[in-house]
Image (tube, rainbow, N blue to C red):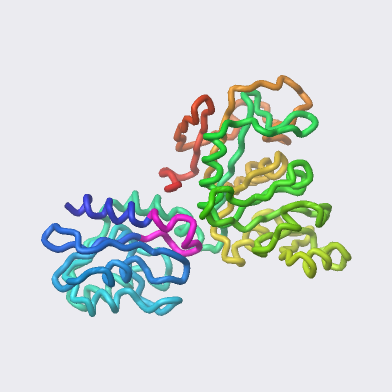
């Protein structure tokens, strides 16, 4: 029965997708005599944790078993320690899918529960629970965002015609998948050329979905207030990443003061990896990289991606001057190619998605 109830807890945790970052997705199920007393999940960042929500819904807690997808916290953060409430509620047993990698918690929550005489079982559906929080597990350790690359291409690997026409390469089902990604990841990153050519809003089009932080990689600060991503910034979620040489430009001051644009600046000695660390300092735990070609190529070249999905449409441009989704590589041997691993095939009617990960296991999106 442990697997059964933990599966319910994992499904409950997924209800927090798009609302809890940079906190983890966590679900909890309170059980007594093989009957579910209550379920709960972490509903929003800064809000009560899953264990608290489940316990508060239950009429009876004494002598029950708590199933939880992540080790209960044992320290004061935005909320009090969950371990205190579990002990106070006279719960008899706590079944935990996986330990929390956060150094403030890891193993300490378990120890507190055991010291209070609560039986603890660890490792039920552990892999599924770790897949649930791939992003959290990476971010909590080094504060560098999880990088997921999304691109829609023709059969011959193009993302646009030579005059930058790209709407639409993929079909509506594939584009709906992209909307789910935009709701799932904390940030969305494009280059300045994508802004200039497509004038995207980079917002979720589905009502109720959370908009990600919009990140524009614009070394020379070429974009202006005429673009939607700048002048439609009422939520103040647009961040421009640019050279520190641009700090004293009038455009820099205009965008910052008149349009509430935030900036991340970098020196010529800093790398893309350095920039990602700066982005992580804003509490952005994950980034959906959407383009264009030079940006996507940079992440592949510097091996700075964790996963992604390449969606292929049954269309052929056959033009050497059309825009490829990758460029700047010059391998002489086939074994020098980038080999994508841990592949999952997704079908969107006549479009095919190649979802890939460096580490085994898929994100719950």
Q: Which residues are magenta?
A: 14-26
Furthest toward the front, the residue is 207
| Number of numbered labels in the structure image | 0
Above or below: residue 360 compared with residue 12: above
Measuring from the top left, give residue 232's x and y in whole percent.
Answer: 71, 57
Q: Viewer-proximal residue, 351 or 94?
A: 351
Figure quadrant of residue 234? bottom right
Measuring from the top left, give residue 205's x and y in whole percent.
Answer: 58, 48
Q: Is residue 288 left or right of residue 321?
A: left
Which residue is rendered at x = 15% and y = 73% of the image? 62
Q: Is residue 149 left or right of residue 126?
A: right
Give yes or no for residue 18 being in the magenta stretch.
yes
Q: Is residue 39 left or right of residue 274?
A: left
Measuring from the top left, give residue 121's x and y in whole percent.
Answer: 22, 62
Which residue is rendered at x = 41% and y = 73% of the image? 104
Furthest toward the right, the residue is 250
Which residue is rendered at x = 55% and y = 45% of the image? 179
Give yes or no for residue 140 being in the magenta stretch.
no
Measuring from the top left, give residue 146's x and y in whole percent.
Answer: 54, 53
Figure quadrant of residue 97? bottom left
Above or below: residue 80 compared with residue 159: below
Which residue is rendered at x = 77% and y = 67% of the image? 256
- Secondary structure mainly formed by the magenta segment: loop
Q: Viewer-proximal residue, 60 or 90?
A: 60
């Amino acid at each position: 029965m442990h697997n059964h109830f933990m599966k319910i807890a994992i499904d409950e945790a997924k209800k927090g997708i798009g609302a809890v970052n940079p906190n983890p997705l966590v679900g909890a199920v309170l059980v007594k005599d093989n009957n579910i007393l209550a379920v709960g999940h972490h509903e929003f960042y800064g809000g009560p944790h899953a264990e608290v929500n489940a316990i508060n819904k239950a009429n009876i807690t004494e002598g029950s078993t708590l199933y939880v997808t992540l080790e209960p916290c044992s320290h004061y953060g935005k909320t009090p320690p969950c371990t205190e409430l579990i002990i106070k509620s006279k719960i008899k047993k706590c079944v935990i899918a996986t330990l929390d990698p956060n150094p403030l918690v890891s193993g300490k929550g378990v120890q507190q529960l055991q010291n209070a005489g609560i039986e603890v079982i660890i490792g039920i559906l552990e892999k599924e629970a770790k897949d649930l929080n791939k992003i959290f597990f990476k971010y909590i350790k080094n504060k560098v965002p999880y990088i997921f690359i999304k691109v829609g291409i023709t059969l011959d690997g193009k993302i646009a015609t030579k005059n930058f026409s790209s709407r639409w390469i993929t079909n509506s089902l594939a584009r709906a998948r992209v909307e789910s990604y935009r709701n799932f990841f904390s940030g969305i990153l494009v280059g300045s050329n994508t802004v200039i050519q497509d004038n995207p809003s980079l917002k979720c089009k589905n009502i109720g979905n959370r908009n990600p932080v919009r990140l524009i990689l614009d070394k020379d600060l070429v974009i202006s207030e005429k673009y939607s991503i700048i002048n439609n910034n009422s939520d103040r979620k647009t961040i421009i990443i640019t050279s520190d040489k641009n700090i004293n430009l009038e455009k820099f001051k205009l965008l910052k003061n008149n349009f509430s644009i935030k900036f991340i600046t970098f020196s010529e000695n800093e790398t893309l990896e350095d920039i990602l660390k700066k982005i992580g300092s804003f509490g952005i735990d994950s980034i959906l990289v959407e383009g264009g070609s030079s940006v996507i190529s940079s992440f592949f070249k510097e091996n700075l991606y964790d996963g992604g999905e390449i969606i292929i449409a049954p269309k052929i441009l056959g033009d050497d001057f059309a825009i490829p989704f990758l460029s700047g590589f010059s391998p002489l041997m086939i074994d020098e190619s980038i080999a994508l691993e841990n592949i999952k095939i997704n079908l969107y009617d006549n479009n095919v998605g190649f979802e890939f990960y460096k580490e085994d296991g898929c994100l719950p999106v």
